[in-house]
Amino acid sequence: MKAWIDKYFSVIRMTWIQALEYKANAIVGTFAIFSGLAIEFLIWKQVFQAQGLTEIRGFTFNGLMAYIFLCMIVGQLKSSWATSMEMIDSIRTGEMNKYLIRPISFFTYHFMMFIGHNSLFYIVYSTVLILFPILLPGWAFPTLLHVLGFIMALLISIYLSYAIYFCMVCFAFWFGEVRALVIAYNISNIVLSGQIIPLRLFPDSVRNIINLTPLQFLVDFPVSIATANLPIKFWLPKMGIALSWCIVMTLAGRVIYKSGIRVYGGYGA
Amino acid sequence: MEDMVHRYFSLWISFFNNSLTRDLEFKANFIGGLLVDIIYYGIQFFFFSIIYSYVDAIGVFTREDVMIFLVITFLADTFYMFFFSGNLFNLNRWMVRGDLDYFLLKPMNSQFMVSFRYVKSYALVSVVILLIMLTTLVSAYSAPIGFINVIAFVFSFLMGTILWYGVDFIISSSCFWFKNFSVSGWLSHEILKFSTRPDSIYTGLLRKMLLSMIPMILIASIPTRTLLYGPDVRYLLWQFFIAIFFFLLTRIIWKKGLIRYESASS
């Protein structure tokens, strides 16, 4: 076990050092969050002002902004599409051979790389999240329990998101180039996971369908905990369902990977 | 001058044929590219349908206007993708790996080469679909849209495309100064987001900025206003002026950047 931890921790450390060299990623990422928030702020301000509304489906304007702000942070932290592109490339070009001849798991190695690459984001956004309840008290994290619940749900979200991406990446064994699939998922995921509009504002028919998928656990679940929009009594049952989805997606990924590796030519395309 | 235009046009046709052959080699990805576009359009329509379920109009833009605005936004994006995105997105990689040398050695204008070499041919299908959608929406629009509006719209739309090229080219060219600016595509995408929302949400200083320094309002909102509400000469002249300014800026930045280029792969 110790050898396993040492092996993969060294991957995190290596990619962390690489990530620290490219600080521009964190700067652009932060810009992305604040510019996205500015646009959402202006649109929803118009909606609230034009109709003279004080709240929409339980969201006050400030509450909605806090929700969207946290959604954008969680959305970026859990998104592993860049790592997925690298994985697709390694399958397509035959570079994956190096994982087959070494005692490394393709899944775990890239998961650790993803965490290492995102480490700069974790530092920047953790600082923002720590400052959040200090600068804007009452908008999120009302108690320490909510902080803990948010961290737990965020960890589940990061893992679940990676496991879903992994399943899609493995289709590269058959089709060679599946970037389009990953991008299509990424685009739909931004809206359907509640990253720019809370799921609660969706029409009931759409929400009922989303509730049957793991998408609700990617962004909406951790942010609903942080903003106290989800009563505490629902946390554990929801976490149980989210963990079940993690197991399902991990097993699905394994099955697809094992089938895919049989058709893998190892010579690139 | 005529010869030069003819020569460069022939060159672009060759680039297009070559890109089409390359794209068709990966048929699944070709179809996938179309699928991505359709999902992107669907998601944007869905986003605004939710917004408009709580509001009747955003500024002057009613639900009907915003549907046309969205199609124009998609059209601008697809036009840009068709011509430029396969090139400018890769500029940083070409520079870091030293591949830019091959572009500079060709007996033609190097900026033309790095801007037009790879055409995203699948975008042509999206352009056709979007043009049909736009025609349908415009013909079903509640108020009559005159021929003058359409002519002015085409002009405004082209200026918008030149502007977006200018902004993206400047961002991509910053790799000459930063040595490795791999997130330039991401930054461009984030800035472009401002053009995908109706301009009536922007007020004050931000509106002034988005009409001048970062002219995102001029890309899709002004063409939409021109088409729906008739040409406003002040807006069109301003758009023309800014488009020329940004285009000239790309020329200057490209030349300055090339002086800094060390031509070494690393």
Image (cartoon, coloured by chain):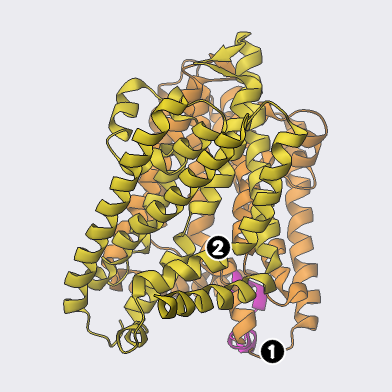
Locate residue B151: give its quadrant. top right
Label 2 crowd (10 A; few <14 / some 14-19 / many >=20): many
Q: Looking at this view, is B139 or A248 the one in front?
A: A248
Q: Amino acid at mark 1?
A: Ser
- Tell me which amino acid carries mark 2: Phe
Chain letter, orange in picture: B
Q: Position of residue B114 (x, y in %)?
A: 60, 74
Identify which residue, A7 or A78, lies in the foreground. A7
**B174 sits to left or right of A106:** right
* Start-end of magenta stretch: B99-115
Residue, x 75% and y 54% (percent of image)?
Answer: B244
- Work out which residue is located at the far front of the displayed protein and give it: A2
Residue A259: where, in percent of width, then height?
17, 70
Identity of the residue drawn at 36% across and 81% down: A104
The residue carrying mark 2 is B84
The residue positioned 52% from the left and 16% from the top of the image is A58
Q: Quadrant of residue B89?
A: bottom right
Identify the mark nearer the N-term, 1 or 2.
2
Q: Which chain is yellow?
A: A
Labels 1 & 2 near each other (Cβ < 8 A): no
Q: Quadrant of residue B238?
A: top right
* Residue located beneath label 1 in the image: B263
